[in-house]
Amino acid sequence: MPFKTKNIDLSPKLKLGIGRKPSQFKILKFTCLLLLFLTVLIGLQAFVIFINKAPLTKAEDAGKVLGTSELEDRFIEVTVTKLDTLYGLSQTYDVPWTTIAEINNLTAPFMLKENQKLLVPKK
């Protein structure tokens, strides 16, 4: 006696996977594509930064890489007097005080000493 087989029609949910709606697959696909795009974009940006090389910001790095004449072209050497402050120098040379502190490796509380030499970028 041969077996009789019946064709069973599955619901759309069962065809796609139990418990998942078709819209969830679209969201998942979109999310994966978005993450892939962002990863490629960040990689390209890192590559461009690596190729262009960031400009010199630290005085000690500038002294190692730049010759004396190039260093003089980019920076002004300032000798600190008794009444000078970082903020006052920033106002005098129209440069943010944070830039002067960063170039000269100054740390908090940013106290300046008399006769201290500072490099200030030229405008």
Image (spheres, rainbow, N blue to C red):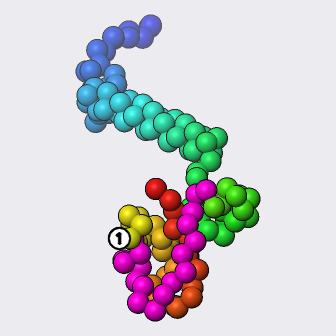
User: Measuring 58% from the left and 53% from the top, which residue is drawn there?
Assistant: 55
Asked if the magenta segment contains residue 84, the reply would be yes
Q: Nearer the viewer, residue 59 or 19?
A: 59
Q: Eyeballing the image, is 80 above or below 26? A: below
Residue 64 in view, yes or no: yes
Residue 77 in percent (x, y) is at 58, 71
- Which amino acid type is shown beneath numbered disc 1? Gln
Q: SS class of the residue under badge 1?
A: helix
Residue 5 shown left or right of residue 81 in the figure: left
Q: Residue at x 52, y 80 (%)?
A: 106
**Residue 16, image x and y in percent?**
34, 25
Residue of label 1: 91
Other residues around mark 1 within 10 Å, as few (<14) / some (14–19) / many (≥20): few
Left or right? Give the position of 118 relative to 98.
right
Measuring 48% from the left and 87% from the top, which residue is drawn there? 81
Q: How many marks?
A: 1
